[in-house]
């Protein structure tokens, strides 16, 4: 079994031309083989299920059905449940990002937010700026709208914002959108520095380009100081921020949000009406009820402590077991780190060898919007306990050493 997308029989009817640009998720295809019980998988972008507040979520749903069941089972407004939007505004305000409820749209996970923004903002041929590498599912979404990519580099401080001005002259036309994950980026785990945050917002304001700030991991910082969101630095309405409870409560709730200028949120609301009418009402009401009594900050503290410990175990294990010439990022939060293999090695070629030793990762080539690079892999540290992380890195290090020799 390889990491390549499997060959699938052609559909019985001709598909839209745009589908030729949409590729199956390499991560999802890999998970089909990597999530076997006998495989130590570090491939999925999975939170730790043992940390889901199952009892509290169950109690919130029970209360909703007992006290407001008929309303919870009825159609609702596209914008989302009012008390939930109010909580989001209050919570963001405590972090310096101020918004009113008419600037908040509840989405079915933050992934839907990416799709709605693309649908509202992008025409075929429009230019989207992304960093290399970038979040795979965002690249999938944008490709479906037949865009062109302008790629800037990234380093340990995130997107190379200093390359943006030169990019304008190289491309010859103004980008329509800048997309990035500023905190503990997927796949690298790196964070955009404060200096670059200010510079990026100034650039977008100067050229009137919308920034899509995708922030699913921002509250999972286990080391260092909190950095302000791009939206909190914006005074001219050039930032739309996406957030989610998938990483802080449970992904099965499918509750996310988009926050931004009123005219953009109104447009997103209109296109969401044609997508799913509204996000599941029961889940919205249960989440709002949960947050009214649940100690959300204490839950975040637990997640940060556990993920910080697991990240440190993975970093120490990489140091112990990886052969010379292997390098990796050192995240301050989130769920991922990024490994560069010794010179001349390919993660795609390594994947089936790793599966034979019952360990799995995600090859990095699919995360590149431009020419794929095969010498990288993504590892998820949040989903395995420390002893299995140590064993997994031992297996992986042995596979790399054997393949290298």
Image (cartoon, grey):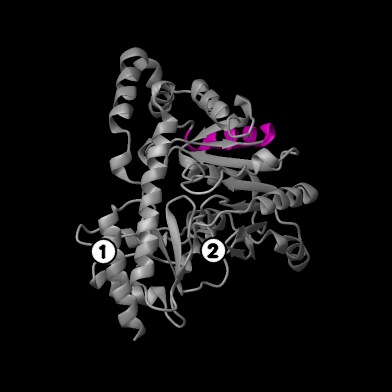
The percent position of residue 316, horizontal first and vertical second, equals 37, 63
Residue beneath the point at 66% across and 42% down: 239
Which residue lies most toward the bottom here?
Answer: 405
Q: Quadrant of residue 132?
A: bottom right
Q: Which residues are magenta?
A: 261-276
The percent position of residue 146, horizontal first and vertical second, equals 59, 58
Looking at the rendered structure, which numbered label has been put on residue 123? none
Main SS category, magenta section: helix
Q: Is residue 275 magenta?
A: yes
Q: Quadrant of the N terminus?
A: bottom left
Residue holding disc 2: 133
7 or 326: nearer the eye?
326
Q: Is residue 264 left or right of residue 358?
A: right
Q: Count of labels shown?
A: 2
Residue holding disc 1: 391
- Tell me if residue 181 comes above or below residue 56 in the rendering: below
**Which numbered disc flags the more N-terminal residue, 1 or 2?**
2
Q: Is residue 380 magenta?
A: no
- Tell me if residue 119 comes above or below residue 343 in the rendering: above
Local crowd size for mark 2, using a 10 Å CA cut-off: few (<14), some (14–19), many (≥20) = many
């Amino acid at each position: 079994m390889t990491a390549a997308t499997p060959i699938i029989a052609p559909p019985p009817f001709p598909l839209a031309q745009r589908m030729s640009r949409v590729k199956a998720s390499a991560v999802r295809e890999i998970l089909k083989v990597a999530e076997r019980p006998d495989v130590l998988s570090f491939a999925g972008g999975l939170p730790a299920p043992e940390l889901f507040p199952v009892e509290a979520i169950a109690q919130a749903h029970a209360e909703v059905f007992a006290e407001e069941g008929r309303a919870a089972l009825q159609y609702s407004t596209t914008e989302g449940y009012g008390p939930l939007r109010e909580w989001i505004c209050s919570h963001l305000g405590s972090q310096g990002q101020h918004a009113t409820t008419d600037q908040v749209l509840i989405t079915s996970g933050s992934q839907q937010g990416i799709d709605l923004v693309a649908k509202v903002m992008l025409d075929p041929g429009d230019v989207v700026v992304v960093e290399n590498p970038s979040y795979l599912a965002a690249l999938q979404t944008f490709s479906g709208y037949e865009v062109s990519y302008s790629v800037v580099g990234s380093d340990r401080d995130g997107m190379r914002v200093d390359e943006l001005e030169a990019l304008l002259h190289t491309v010859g036309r103004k980008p329509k959108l800048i997309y990035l994950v500023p905190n503990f980026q997927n796949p690298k785990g790196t964070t955009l520095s404060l200096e670059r945050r200010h510079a990026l917002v100034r650039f977008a304001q100067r050229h009137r380009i919308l920034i899509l700030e995708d922030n699913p991991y921002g509250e999972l910082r286990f080391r260092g100081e909190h950095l302000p969101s791009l939206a909190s630095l914006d005074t001219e309405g050039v930032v739309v921020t996406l957030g989610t409870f998938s990483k802080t409560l449970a992904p099965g709730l499918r509750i996310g949000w988009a926050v931004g200028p009123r005219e953009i949120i109104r447009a997103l609301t209109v296109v969401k009406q044609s997508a799913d009418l509204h996000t599941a009402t029961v889940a919205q009401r249960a989440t709002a009820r949960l947050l009214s009594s649940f100690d959300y900050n204490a839950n975040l503290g637990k997640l940060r402590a556990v993920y910080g410990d697991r990240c440190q175990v993975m970093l120490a294990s990489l140091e112990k077991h990886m052969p010379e010439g292997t390098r990796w990022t050192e995240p301050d939060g989130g769920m991922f780190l990024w490994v560069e293999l010794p010179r001349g090695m390919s993660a795609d070629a390594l994947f089936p060898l790793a599966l034979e030793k019952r360990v799995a990762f995600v090859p990095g080539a699919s995360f590149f919007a431009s020419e794929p690079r095969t010498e990288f892999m993504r590892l998820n540290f949040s989903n395995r306990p420390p002893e299995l992380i140590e064993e997994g890195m031992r297996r992986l290090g042995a596979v790399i050493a054997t393949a290298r020799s």
